[in-house]
């Protein structure tokens, strides 16, 4: 997901790995605690996220960790980079933060870190951010995403009222990547297995083919940028939904590493908005 130099001015928290768990062959759960999390505030949104800080290979920082000192004394290429991860759960009583990581072997930074994490390991992060939670007054809910959106979809399902209809489409590599999801009672959850196909194609087809229930929908569509773009156009142009009923964003982009996606995301979003405006004119 998003990668960028750590920014000044955001609250920095030091966490300690408490335990880890393999949920599926390619999904690792890491539970983080520590005294510093006592001031961590999450719970308003179901897409809360944190930005984990990772030093470049071979770089170590003096303790106590001090971003101002790092910026003053080290060249920019030695500053930490961030990986953005959705908060799966936050338990303020137990002071435990749960994050789920997609893992593809040695690829990337965060996945290998999660796979190697041991109790007692330290990790610094900023946040939480966020902006979406299922509206209680919505007529029904639409949740759509790939593996990267699974934590937020699961958190949203826990918040949807039990009598509120929900249509949920989750695309994963194959049946071995399915995991139990909360069901508030009126949710229809469909797992889509890409089996080597392009990420998101099945999600686009599923939403195109969906007969929308009666009432105003509150939609959450997140994951790979190309399918998100296609579904944004469909929901905005073909279905006529206003942005006030949508939470929709690309977490990552096929064919780009995380640094490349982050650096070009603003331009990508602007192009999407311009194309959409022309189609709606």
Image (spheres, rainbow, N blue to C red):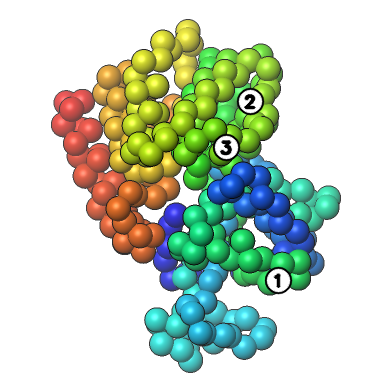
Q: Nearer the viewer, mark 2 or mark 3?
A: 3
Asked if 55 appears above or below 161 in the picture, the reply is: below
Question: As rendered, which of 205 and 220 lies closer to the eye?
Answer: 205
* Furthest residue toward top: 214
As drawn, is 234 to the left or to the right of 29? left
- Which element type, helix, strand or loop, lies under badge 3? helix
The residue depicted at 62 percent of the width and 88 percent of the height is: 62
Q: Residue 76, image x and y in percent?
A: 40, 82
Asked if 37 appears above or below 209 in the picture, the reply is: below
- Which element type, helix, strand or loop, lies under badge 1? loop
Residue 160, numbered label = 2
User: What residue is shown with label 1?
Assistant: 121
* Furthest residue toward bottom: 73
Mark 1: few, some, or many residues within 10 Å (few <14, many ≥20)? few
Residue 143 makes an appearance in the image: no
Q: Residue 236, image x and y in percent?
A: 31, 26
Task: Evaluate if marks 2 and 1 touch, with contact meaning CB atoms under 8 Å apart.
Answer: no
Mark 1 or mark 3, which has the lower sequence index? 1
The residue depicted at 68 percent of the width and 72 percent of the height is: 122
Q: Residue 141, image x and y in percent?
A: 52, 22
Mark 2 or mark 3, which has the lower sequence index? 2
- Which element type, helix, strand or loop, lies under badge 2? loop
User: What residue is shown with label 3?
Assistant: 176
Asked if 223 appears above or below 61 in the picture, the reply is: above
Residue 28 makes an appearance in the image: yes
As drawn, is 230 to the left or to the right of 68? left
Quarter of the figure with the C terminus: top left
Asked if 134 appears above or below 149 in the picture, the reply is: above
What distance separates the C-alpha of mark 2 from that of mark 3? 26 Å
């Amino acid at each position: 997901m998003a990668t960028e130099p750590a920014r000044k001015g955001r609250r920095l928290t030091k966490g300690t790995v408490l335990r880890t768990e393999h949920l599926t062959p390619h999904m690792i759960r890491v539970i983080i605690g520590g005294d510093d999390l006592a001031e961590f505030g999450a719970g308003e949104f179901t897409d809360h996220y944190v930005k984990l800080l990772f030093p470049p290979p071979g770089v170590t920082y003096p303790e106590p960790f001090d971003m101002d000192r790092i910026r003053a004394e080290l060249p920019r290429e030695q500053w930490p980079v961030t990986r953005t991860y959705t908060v799966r759960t936050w338990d303020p009583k137990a002071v435990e933060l749960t994050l789920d990581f997609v893992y593809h072997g040695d690829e990337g930074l965060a996945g290998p870190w999660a796979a190697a994490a041991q109790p007692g390991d330290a990790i610094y992060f900023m946040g939480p951010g966020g902006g979406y939670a299922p509206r209680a007054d919505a007529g029904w809910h639409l949740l759509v995403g790939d593996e990267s959106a699974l934590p937020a979809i699961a958190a949203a399902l826990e918040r949807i009222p039990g009598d509120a209809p929900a249509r949920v489409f989750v695309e994963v590599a194959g049946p071995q990547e399915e995991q139990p999801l909360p069901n508030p009672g009126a949710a229809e959850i469909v797992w889509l297995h890409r089996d080597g196909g392009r990420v998101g194609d099945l999600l686009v087809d599923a939403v195109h083919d969906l007969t929308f229930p009666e009432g105003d929908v509150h939609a959450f569509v997140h994951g790979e940028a190309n399918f998100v773009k296609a579904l944004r156009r469909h929901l905005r142009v073909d279905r006529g939904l206003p942005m006030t009923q949508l939470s929709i964003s690309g977490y990552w982009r096929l064919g780009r590493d995380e640094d490349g996606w982050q650096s070009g995301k603003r331009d990508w979003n602007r192009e999407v908005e311009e194309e959409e405006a022309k189609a709606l004119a």
